[in-house]
Image (tube, rainbow, N blue to C red):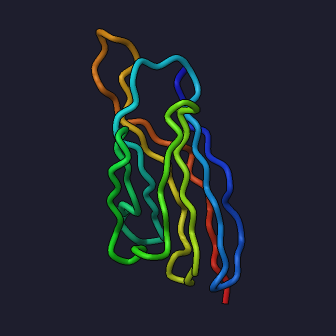
Amino acid sequence: QVQLVESGGGLVQPGGSLRRSCAVEGSIFMIFVMGWYRQAPGKQRELVAAITSAGSTNYADSVKGRFTISRDNAKNTVYLQMHSLKPEDTAVYYCNAFIQIGAMSGITDYWGQGTQVTVSS
């Protein structure tokens, strides 16, 4: 019943910008860390950025200064603002969140469906 719904992917030219959104839908008790991962063809999935419920952030070195992660706890939504995009940013981007469904439930790692971001030459 709980799912992560992504939006905002697409095609952009080098140097351009994109904004990704990911909303947690369904009844949940608590959301802990949220983040974005990406995976290029033939490559390992890597962490792009993460943010705690208190707003502390962590970024991959390759995106520092270009990407900004944020979240709206009232809307159960995490965002990724991407600027100065490079061809090497091309990948499927996945939303990720650690969620406690109920007060007596364990914490489960949830994933969005993944959305293509293509930075063309």
Asked if 22 appears above or below 99 in the picture, the reply is: below
Residue pictured at 58% horizontal, 32% vertical: 75
- Return the x and y of residue 19 as percentages of the image width and height: 64, 60
Residue pictured at 40% horizontal, 30% vertical: 31
Name the quadrant of the N terminus.
top right
Instruction: Give the number of marks.
Output: 0
Is 72 positioned to the left or the right of 121 in the image?
Answer: left
Is 120 positioned to the left or the right of 106 in the image?
Answer: right
Asked if 107 appears above or below 70 in the picture, the reply is: above
Asked which quadrant contains residue 20, the reply is: bottom right
Asked which quadrant contains residue 12, the reply is: bottom right
Residue pictured at 58% horizontal, 27% vertical: 25
Name the quadrant of the C terminus.
bottom right
Asked if 74 appears above or below 59 in the picture, the reply is: above
Name of the residue lying farthest toward the top: 104
Residue pictured at 57% horizontal, 68% vertical: 82
Query: In this orientation, which residue lies closer to the viewer: 12 or 1?
Result: 12
Query: In this orientation, which residue lies closer to the viewer: 40 or 30?
Result: 30
- Return the x and y of residue 41 as percentages of the image width and height: 49, 70
Query: In this orientation, which residue lies closer to the viewer: 49 or 37?
Result: 49
